Structures are given as structure tokens and as C-alpha cells.
């Protein structure tokens, strides 16, 4: 995966945009950090009177106040530290929550094509791992940087105030330290991206194994999966080690540079001319300040990698947030369409494919009538349904419902008009009742749900569960058979009572016996609705008002069952073949 790298500043500014309404926390945090730095500086500053006046006996009062002073200082320091940690963590966690929520919402509004090109594992890792990296950077690392940064500044001021000549030496080393930090930051950032990509691969590899566990068992894919996972987990380890070694090298290097300055000051102090201008207190103060500088410099270098990882994570999250969601520009809201459907010369090619999946498809279905699509698998039947539901945009030609282009309706409004039952029914990890009434809120009563389930012949098996409609179906409905899920999907469609019905091999998971049963339910479902039925078993569509035979993206035959059977074309052949098979 390649990353275009926006500047740290741009990413940081955008991240700050998420902090806007959390100013109070930010102010509290800053007060805490400044207080912390001030206390540290005051403590060091107190060394001077202690040495010059207290210990020399000039002013014995200093010694009396010292114990109280120490307690007050340490207490204040503790309060300031708590305030800065708490406030910044509060701000940081709010940022992450907001980021996670907007990512989640954004993903929900992405077009189907977006998901075709990405692995679920990768996206999961972005929501969980990457956003946590931002949390780390925002709460822990920012606290350190600001708190220690303020301490460094306070200490430098203190030193300058005491002897600017000696302190100047620190500034000779400063730019070199800056250069090293800059170099290291870039490296951290790159490694951060690599670690996040590697984490994505780990989630993907795990997900592949977990979802395909039965296949792994049956085909003996253990070793293959183990190898795949072994290699991605090793790559995470290697990237992490690179990060750790970069960090482990940078800290001593920067401390070494700082110690050069310290050594130089000590060396200068041996000159009598310098010695004369300093009291023992001033000298101790400068040396202690320099030593005290080591710790914050170390922690700034240390947390720099967290910050860079966080910024790298922000980059990748912002990139997704900037990706275009589904185009939803239609404004013609309609309460309930009559259900006239027309495909006008529709040609469509999937992204990344050369051959069109649909070629100049033309057909009309009048409101309340039924259209059947038959043809080999891969001929383009499901694609026709996906164009109608606007799962894929970017067609040539036009699709009309009630004489109005479907692109003129708001997406929600358009999809409300259709019920879609496919061969792959997804059930949510919830009760059967909630699955049937999915996303309808309180619109439907319990009685209506039961009625729908009864018409779909679903009540027959639902009643056998001890908890009936309130049985939780497990992730993706693992507790149910294919036919049972299909019946729940049909109940869903019945309940919503949409004017247009799309059945994409809706009975393919059923045996002939149950199919006959469910066919009754489907017949009820199709009544008074426009329906598009994609069927693998021709016997189920004999009564359709019109049958289209799709081949290689084009419609090659059309007519009703009677006419097509007599025409001795492809349809007639298919019918014969299925009769022989049965
Ligand atoms: P059918 O439902 O008739 O079996 P589809 O409409 O699913 O056929 O597929 C038609 C063609 O489009 C096939 O060649 C298939 O490989 C291709 N296709 C289907 N879905 C996608 C997709 N998401 N991305 C790219 N190509 C696809
Ligand atoms: Mg299909």
C-alpha cells in the first residue's frame, strides 16, 4: 500500500479540528503542564538561596522554611501533574471517539465498490488499531511533549537569567539536537505507516482463517494458513523492532549531544575569570538545571515515536474519510412509487474490469407485473439487480422508476421502495423479531411481525425455539439453516411491504420440498407488487409475465414461458435440460 504523506503540520492541524469543542479540557491541561514546569523551575531556583544564604549562615530563616517549602512544592507538582494528565487524556479520548465514530459512519456510507477493493480485516484494523494509535499520541505523548517541553523552556529561562554566557552553550548544541530529532521523526513516521499496514494484514489473515475455518478443516489448509499468519505476524514484529531500535538509538544520541554542552560548561567553569562572576549557588543552579534538562529531553525523544505513529495513523484515517461516499444528490422524494421499471440501454462495467458486465440492456416492467431473469451464472443477472438498487453507479443509459431516473431520488427514498431477498441472507446478531423488523424502529407491532413470519412460513420453525421470536440467532444467524434464514428474509420483505420486490435466487438454499412451501409465501409476496425474479430453477418462474434470457451481459431472448418454450431457442433448451435433470 502506498501513502501520500501530508505534512505533519497539516495532519496535526486537522486533528486539532476535532478538539474545537473541548477547549475547557485543553485549557485545564495547559494550566497543569505550565504549573508543573513552573514548580520544577521554582524548586531548582530555590537551590540558590539555600546554598548562598541558608548554608552559608547569612540568613538562617531560609533553612527553617525549607521543609515546608518542599512539601508545598511536591503537593503542587502532584496536583499539576494530575490536572495535565487527566485533562489531556479526556481531550485525547474524546478525539478518538469522534474519529472512530466519523470513520464508522463514513464507512457505512461508502459505495459497495469501495468494499470490493478492500479487505474487511484491513478496515477493522483501522477502526480498532489505528485509532488507538491516535489515542496514545493524543493523550500520553502530547502530555509528555507539552509538559516536558514547558519544563525545558522554564529551565532554559532560569539558566539564562542566572548566566546567559554559560547558557548560550546550550544553544550551540540546540540546532544539532533539532536536526537529529527531525530525522528520527521522519523515520518514526514511515515505520508507523508500515506497522499499521502490517497490523491490517494480521487482522486480514486472522479474519480469513476464522471465516473460512470449515474450509481450512476440510481441505487441510492448516499449514498454509499458519504460514500466512506466521509471515504477517513476523512482519509486524520486524517493523516494531525497527521502531524500537530507532528509538533506542535516538535517546542516547541526543543525550550525548546534551552532555557535550554540559561538559563544556564544566570546562569553562574552571577558568578563574568565569569562576569569579559566579556564586556557588548560581553555579550549582546552572549545573543542576542542565542535569534536570536531561530527563525531559529524554522523554520528548522517547514519546516522539508515539506521536509520529499517531500522526501516521491519522494520515491513513483521514485518507479514508476523504474518500467519496455514495453519490446521493437526488431530490425528488416520493412516498410510494407505483412500480414501473424501465432499463434504457444500460451498459455497465465493474471498476477494474475491461469487459462490460451489462451491454445495452433494455426492458420495461409495468407496475404490479413480474419479470424473470434467467441465464448462466456470471451472465449479469445479479448485476441488473445491483444497478436497480444503486449498489453500483456509473452506468451508461438510464434506469427509470415511474418514469423518473433513479438518480433523481434520494438514495434512502429509492431503496425504501424495494425489498431485496438474495441467495446470501445476512442476519444480525440479534433476536429473530429484531431481524425481521430490522431498522424499522417502532413502526411495526408485534402482531404485524408475527403475521409476516407466518406468511413467510417462518413461524413453523420459530415456534420450535423455546424463546420463539426472541431467540438470538448468533453471528450471521449461525443457528439457522439456509432455508430458515431465507424465510426470515422473506418475512422482512413482507413486513416492509415495498412496492418493488427483487428476488435474487431467493430459494436457492432450499430443497424442492421447502421451495414449494416457500413458493406460496413468495406468491403472496409478489401479489400487487412489481417483481424482478432471478431464478435458478425454471419451474418457479413459469408464471412470470415476461422472461428475459441473459447471456454474457446481453438479453438474447424475451417473452413469456409459453412463447419461449415454443420458440425452440436457448430457453426451450434450458427447460428441457432441467426436466431431464429432475
Ligand atoms: P449472475 O448473477 O448472472 O451469476 P453477476 O451479475 O453476478 O452474474 O456477474 C456478471 C459478471 O460481472 C461476471 O463476469 C462477474 O465476474 C462480474 N462481477 C460480478 N460482481 C463483480 C464485482 N463486484 N466486481 C467485479 N466484477 C464483478
Ligand atoms: Mg447472481
Image: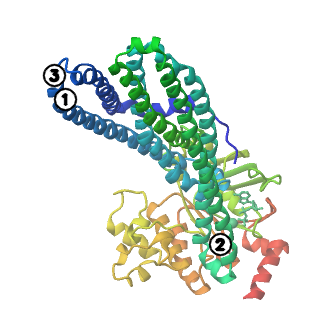
The colour scheme is rainbow
- Can residue 102 be seen? no
- Residue for badge 2: 226
Q: Position of residue 255 (x, y in %)?
A: 53, 35
- Please tell me which of labels 2 and 3 falls first in the chain: 3
Which residue lies at the image location 55% right of the left edge and 61% below the top edge? 529
- Residue for badge 3: 60
- Can residue 30 be seen? yes
Q: In terms of secondary structure, where does tag 3 sit?
A: loop
- Residue for badge 1: 66
Q: Nearer the viewer, residue 126 or 389?
A: 126
* Vertical arrangement, residue 163 with respect to residue 44, above or below: above
Alpha carbon separation for disc pair 2 and 1? 65 Å
Q: Nearer the viewer, residue 231 or 272?
A: 272
Q: In terms of secondary structure, where does tag 2 sit?
A: helix
Q: Nearer the viewer, residue 8 or 177?
A: 177
Mark 2: C-beta under 8 Å from nearest atom of ligand 1 = no
- Residue 567 placement, left or right of 468: right
Amino acid at each position: 500500500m502506498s501513502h501520500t504523506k501530508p505534512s505533519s503540520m497539516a495532519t496535526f492541524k486537522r486533528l486539532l479540528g476535532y478538539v474545537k469543542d473541548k477547549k475547557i479540557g485543553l485549557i485545564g491541561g495547559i494550566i497543569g503542564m505550565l504549573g508543573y514546569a513552573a514548580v520544577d523551575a521554582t524548586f531548582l531556583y530555590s537551590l540558590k538561596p539555600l546554598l548562598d544564604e541558608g548554608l552559608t549562615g547569612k540568613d538562617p530563616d531560609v533553612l527553617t522554611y525549607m521543609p515546608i517549602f518542599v512539601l508545598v512544592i511536591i503537593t503542587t507538582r502532584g496536583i499539576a501533574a494530575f490536572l495535565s494528565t487527566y485533562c489531556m487524556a479526556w481531550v485525547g479520548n474524546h478525539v478518538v471517539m469522534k474519529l472512530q465514530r466519523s470513520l464508522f459512519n463514513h464507512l457505512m456510507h461508502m459505495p459497495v465498490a469501495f468494499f470490493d477493493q478492500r479487505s474487511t480485516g484491513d478496515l477493522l484494523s483501522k477502526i480498532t488499531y489505528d485509532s488507538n494509535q491516535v489515542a496514545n499520541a493524543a493523550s500520553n505523548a502530547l502530555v509528555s511533549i507539552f509538559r516536558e517541553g514547558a519544563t525545558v523552556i522554564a529551565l532554559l529561562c532560569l539558566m539564562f537569567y542566572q548566566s546567559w554566557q554559560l547558557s548560550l552553550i546550550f544553544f550551540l548544541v540546540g540546532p544539532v539536537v533539532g536536526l537529529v530529532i527531525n530525522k528520527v521523526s521522519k523515520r518514526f513516521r514511515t515505520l508507523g505507516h508500515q506497522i499499521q499496514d502490517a497490523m491490517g494484514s494480521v487482522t486480514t489473515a486472522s479474519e480469513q482463517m476464522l471465516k473460512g475455518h470449515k474450509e481450512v478443516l476440510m481441505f487441510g489448509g492448516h499449514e498454509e494458513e499458519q504460514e500466512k499468519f506466521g509471515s504477517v505476524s513476523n512482519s509486524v514484529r520486524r517493523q516494531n523492532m525497527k521502531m524500537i531500535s530507532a528509538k533506542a538509538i535516538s535517546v542516547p544520541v541526543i543525550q550525548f549531544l546534551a552532555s557535550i554542552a554540559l561538559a563544556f560548561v564544566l570546562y569553562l567553569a574552571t577558568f578563574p575569570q568565569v569562576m569569579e562572576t559566579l556564586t556557588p549557588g548560581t553555579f550549582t543552579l546552572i549545573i543542576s538545571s542542565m542535569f534536570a534538562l536531561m530527563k525531559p529531553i529524554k522523554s520528548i525523544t522517547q514519546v516522539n515515536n508515539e506521536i509520529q505513529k499517531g500522526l501516521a495513523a491519522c494520515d491513513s484515517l483521514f485518507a479514508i474519510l476523504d474518500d467519496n461516499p455514495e453519490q446521493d444528490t437526488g431530490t425528488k422524494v416520493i412516498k410510494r412509487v407505483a412500480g414501473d421499471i424501465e432499463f434504457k440501454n444500460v451498459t455497465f462495467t465493474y471498476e477494474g474490469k475491461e469487459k462490460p458486465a451489462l451491454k445495452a440492456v433494455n426492458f420495461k416492467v409495468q407496475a404490479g407485473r413480474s419479470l424473470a431473469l434467467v441465464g448462466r451464472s456470471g451472465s449479469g443477472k445479479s448485476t441488473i439487480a445491483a444497478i436497480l438498487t444503486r449498489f453500483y453507479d456509473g452506468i451508461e443509459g438510464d434506469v427509470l422508476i415511474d418514469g423518473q431516473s433513479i438518480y433523481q431520488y434520494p438514495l434512502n427514498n429509492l431503496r425504501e421502495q424495494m425489498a431485496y431477498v438474495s441467495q446470501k441472507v445476512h442476519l444480525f446478531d440479534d433476536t429473530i423479531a429484531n431481524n425481521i423488523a430490522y431498522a424499522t424502529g417502532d413502526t411495526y407491532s408485534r402482531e404485524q411481525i408475527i403475521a409476516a413470519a407466518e406468511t413467510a412460513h417462518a413461524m413453523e420453525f420459530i415456534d420450535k425455539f423455546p424463546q420463539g421470536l426472541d431467540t438470538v440467532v448468533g453471528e450471521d444467524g449461525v443457528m439457522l439453516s439456509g432455508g430458515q434464514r431465507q424465510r426470515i428474509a422473506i418475512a422482512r420483505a413482507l413486513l416492509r411491504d415495498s412496492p418493488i420486490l427483487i428476488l435474487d435466487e431467493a430459494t436457492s438454499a432450499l430443497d424442492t420440498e421447502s421451495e414449494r412451501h416457500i413458493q406460496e409465501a413468495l406468491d403472496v409476496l409478489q401479489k400487487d407488487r412489481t417483481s424482478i425474479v432471478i431464478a435458478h430453477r425454471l419451474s418457479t418462474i413459469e408464471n412470470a409475465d415476461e422472461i428475459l434470457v441473459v447471456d454474457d451481459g446481453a438479453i438474447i431472448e424475451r417473452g413469456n414461458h409459453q412463447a419461449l418454450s415454443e420458440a425452440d431457442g436457448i430457453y426451450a433448451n434450458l427447460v428441457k435440460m432441467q426436466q431431464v435433470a429432475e
